[in-house]
Image (cartoon, helix red, strand yellow):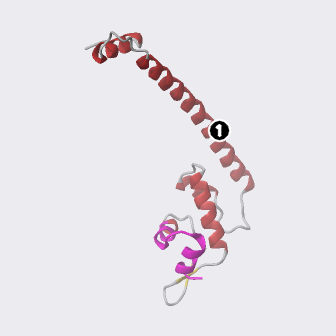
Amino acid sequence: MKIGELAKRSGMAASTIRFYEAKGLLKLGNRQSNGYRDYPLEAVAALSLISGAQQAGFSLDEIKQVLPDDFSSWRHDELISALNKKVSDIESLEVKLAQNKAHLQALIQLIGAKPDDVDCKDNAARVMASMNIPRR
């Protein structure tokens, strides 16, 4: 199939497909004598995998390392290792995000606990003092 049909079937722009080719992610197109690329049906699946991997947080370089040249040569151990590493990265990020969220919620509560008789400037000083931030 030509790139237009591949774009239609995959839901991606032809420029995106060419970008993935240029990055070495999509190696399934054979150039014909007229210069056009001819893509096998597997190219649709490859593009779906690339898109799904990006949505899962994989960089293009990470995808390139585990994506086989053809689907008959998956490197099982490398793929499992890369997937496990990404799960670990996500878990670490979840911990950090939970800490950031708790910090922000505490800050919101501290700022929101402004006494009625305190103006915004003095409240800011109160908040900064409670956080051990020196005043200028």
In the image, residue 15 sits, relative to residue 127, either above or below, namely below
Mark 1, residues whose alpha carbon is within 10 Å: few (<14), some, or many (≥20)? few
Is residue 11 within the magenta segment? yes
Q: Is residue 6 visible?
A: yes
Q: Residue at x 57, y 51 (%)?
A: 58
Kindly indicate the quadrant of the structure image that contains residue 89. Answer: top right
Predominant secondary structure in magenta? Answer: helix
Above or below, 52 relative to 105: below
Q: Find the residue positioned furthest to the bottom.
A: 34
Q: Is residue 76 magenta?
A: no
| Residue sitting at x 36%, y 14% | 128
Instruction: Return the x and y of residue 103 as percentages of the image width and height.
Output: 50, 23
Q: Nearer the viewer, residue 99 or 75?
A: 99
Secondary structure of residue under mark 1:
helix
Name the amino acid, label 1.
Ser
In the displayed structure, 60 sits above or below 98; it is below
Nearer-the-camera pick, 40 or 117: 117
Q: Specify the quadrant of the image occupied by residue 90.
A: top right
Q: Residue 26 at x, y = what percent?
A: 57, 68
Which quadrant would the N terminus be assigned to in this image?
bottom right
Q: The magenta stretch spans which residues? A: 1-19
Furthest residue toward left: 136
Residue 45: % across, % down: 66, 68
Q: Position of residue 40 (x, y in %)?
A: 64, 78
Q: Which residue is mark 1?
A: 88
Which residue corresponds to the image point at 29% horizontal and 14% vertical from the top-left?
119
The C terminus, quarter of image: top left
Is residue 100 found left or right of 68 in the rendered image?
A: left
Q: Can residue 27 be seen from the camera position used here?
A: no
